Amino acid sequence: MIVLTEIAKTKIKHHLNKRGQGLGIKIGVKTTGCSGLAYVLEFVDNHVEHDHVIDYEEFKVFIDPKSFVYLTGMTIDYKRQGLNEGFEFSNPNEKDRCGCGESFRV
């Protein structure tokens, strides 16, 4: 299970409404960076049959089966710090992150 904070839900709804279409977002991981894995968020217009689906009343969160094992138990928040803002991932499966914070290792 993945948990979204209320502000993260609000931001996702805002981006989907601004975009004007979409079923929700897909959360996954890709191989990259110094530590090996990085989080990926993308809009979803068509449901892929094998994805795990979490239904939040106004949108859905899709997770591909390969990424699911890395993301179980994660909380996604949205933070603003100074001039920077964006989604923040708190994942109990992470063992460490690279110095720049862009990638992680499990």
Image: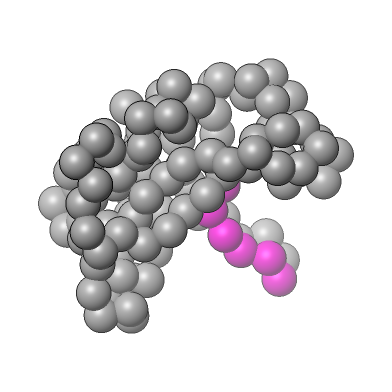
Q: In x, y percent, where is residue 92?
A: 54, 21
**Residue sitting at 56 percent across and 20 percent down?**
93
**Residue sitting at 17 percent across and 58 percent down?**
58
In the image, residue 87 sits, relative to residue 34, either above or below, namely below
**Residue sitting at 33 percent across and 78 percent down?**
19
Q: Does the stretch in magenta take in 87? A: yes
Residue range of the region highlighted in magenta in the rendering: 83-88
| Furthest residue toward right | 99
**Residue sitting at 32 percent across and 27 percent down?**
1
Q: In x, y percent, where is residue 20?
A: 25, 80
In the image, residue 74 sits, relative to residue 14, either above or below, namely above
State which quarter of the image contains the C terminus: top right
Report the colour scheme.
one colour
In the image, residue 83 sits, relative to residue 34, either above or below, namely below
Q: Does the stretch in magenta take in 98? A: no
Left or right, 97 with respect to 8, comes to right
Most frequent secondary structure within the magenta stretch: strand
The reply to whether residue 7 is visible in this rendering is no
Left or right, 74 with respect to 58, comes to right
Q: In x, y percent, where is residue 40?
A: 52, 49
